[in-house]
Structure formats: structure tokens, C-alpha cells
Image (cartoon, grey):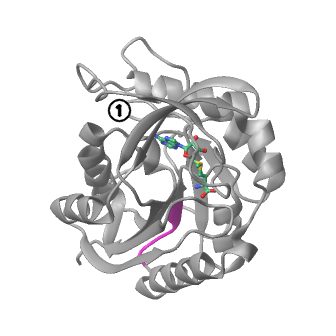
Amino acid sequence: MPGLLRIPRIPVAGRSSPPAGAPAGNASHGLSPKPTFHRRTSEPRPPTPCRAVSSPTVSEPDFIRNTRASYDSIATEYADRFPDDLERRPLDKALINAFAELVRSAGAGPVADVGCGTGHVAAYLSSLDTPVFGIDLSPKMVATARQTYPDLRFHVGSMTAIDLPDDVLGGIAALYSTIHIPDDQLPDVFTEFHRVLAPGGHLLLAFQAGDEHFELTERFGHAISLPCHWRRPENVTELIDKAGLVMHAQVIREPNENEKLPRAFLLARKPR
Ligand SMILES: C[S@@+](CC[C@H](N)C(=O)[O-])C[C@H]1O[C@@H](n2cnc3c(N)ncnc32)[C@H](O)[C@@H]1O
């Protein structure tokens, strides 16, 4: 892999634990067109930070365990249905291009595609000569990504506790993966992004814009238990700001033909 940093021992999810996930409300990000869901109340916070890892532990929070199990059970169908639709989303592609250019010109380090799923965004970034590796909570999604893109590196791990030293990444791409993080955990995830980004490093975040929290209970004929959170972009922007990152651009695009909700793209950087 071009210019990748050595990752300490990743199949580790870090201090907390990792999962897998996918969204509803959108055919391109998968878990929808017609989601089956139950409304849920707020997620319990894990009692103490825990270093969980390649295998679940008793202290692992439910949202991690459920997200991982959900994506593990649908990984094959997910990859078949949503192989790589960036070609059908030119604006999304343009924003990834801009992110890659900012990362390259800052020269601050490689990109981690966090919640990389099938790995297609990492592959696209790599095609732009951007050093990149993927991290995903779901071992099955990671296996799919490795099989599809054998020249790239993918690791099992969680964005809630990224197994990297401070200040090492030139960029974080987190497309439709923070949607599985409960509200009370999201500030800590952005603090974690800030920690691992090098000064001058950039964050590209994408998510369904909305205001709804639910659990997806069925996808591709599988019974799952996948927490999903559609959020107002301004609320997410505020959290990113509180984590110490500086907002560079906020783009909201209307849903494409197979999508139900607008898409939010937030581009931020860690100050030098
Ligand atoms: C909807 S898919 C998006 C995949 C990819 N980013 C894309 O845009 O096609 C969400 C992915 O996030 C992963 N994920 C969910 N929670 C995660 C976490 N805490 N840490 C790392 N990955 C996570 C899931 O396993 C899943 O592969």
C-alpha cells in the first residue's frame, strides 16, 4: 500500500469496541429502501472504557455488538447490492476528490477510511494516489473488502477507540458510518478523530440528514438489530467544532433517485 503507516496491531477495536453497520433511508447506502424498524430510546453508555477487540467482551456496549453482528450477517448481500456506486454520484465523488487533494497537499499522513464497509471509497482514494487504509467494525465486511481490493489494507477496529497513536493521520473519511453511533457517544468519536489526525489533517464526514433514531430489524431477509441515527447537519457541525476541528465546508445535496433523505457532507480540519 502506498505510504501507509504501520498500524500497531489492528484487529483491535481499541478502547471500547467495534461494530458494523449500514444505513436505511437510502438505497445507495444500503440498508433501506424499505426499512423495518423500531423506535429506540437512548443507548446505554458503557460503564467504563474498555479495551475490546477482535472478539467481543462482556463490557462491550450493545450498539457495538449489535452493529457488528448486523453487518456480519448482511455483508455478502450488501457487497452484491452496493458494490460501488460512486459513478452514479458525481457530487459525492467531487467532494472525495477535494478531500483527497487537501490531504495530499497538507502532506500530513495517510487516510483512514473509517467504517470502510466494502472498501470502495478506500479504493477510489487509492486511485487518486492518496495513501489509504480501511477500518471497519465488521470482520465480514473487512473480509469482503480484502477480497475485492487485495492490494489495499483493511483492519477490524472501531472508531470509538482507534488503535493508532496521536497525530498520525492526514485524513479520516467516515462515510455513512457514524450513523450507527448513538448521540451520547458521538462527541467521544469526534474527540478520537481529533486525537489521531495530524495537525493539518482533514475529516470528511457523510451521513443522511434528518432527525430520526431507530433500529433496523430486517435487511436482505436477515433479522438484524442495527441502530441508525439520522441527524441534523448543524448539530453534527457543533459537535465537530467542540472536538477542536475547524469546519471547512458543509454541503447538503438532495436525495438521488434511490434515496429518501438529503445527504450531508462535512469537511473539517485539525488546526496546525
Ligand atoms: C453504511 S456502511 C458504509 C460503508 C462505506 N463507508 C460506504 O460509504 O460505502 C457503514 C459501515 O460502518 C461500519 N461501522 C459501524 N460502526 C462502526 C464503528 N464503531 N467503527 C468502525 N466501523 C463501523 C459498518 O460495519 C459498515 O461497514
State the residue position of label 1: 15
Disc 1 crowd rating (10 Å Cα; few below 14, some 14-19, many 20+) is many
Tell whether circle 1 marks a residue whose Cβ is less than 8 angstroms from ligand 1: no
Residue 41: horizontal and vertical position, in percent?
31, 27
Residue 258: horizontal and vertical position, in percent?
68, 62
Prevailing secondary structure of the magenta residues: loop
Depicted 154 relative to depicted 111: above or below: above
Quarter of the figure that contains the C terminus:
bottom left
The residue depicted at 26 percent of the width and 26 percent of the height is: 45
Residue 111 among those drawn in magenta: yes
Near-viewer residue (212 or 130):
212
Residue 3 among those drawn in magenta: no
The residue depicted at 45 percent of the width and 84 percent of the height is: 102
Relative to 56, 108 lies left or right: left
Depicted 189 relative to depicted 28: above or below: above
Relative to 25, 42 lies left or right: left
Depicted 151 relative to depicted 7: above or below: below
Quarter of the figure that contains the N terminus:
bottom right
Q: Amino acid at mark 1?
A: Arg
Is any atom of residue 248 visible in this view? yes
Image: magenta residue range: 108-112
Depicted 113 relative to depicted 139: above or below: below
The residue depicted at 50 percent of the width and 19 percent of the height is: 56
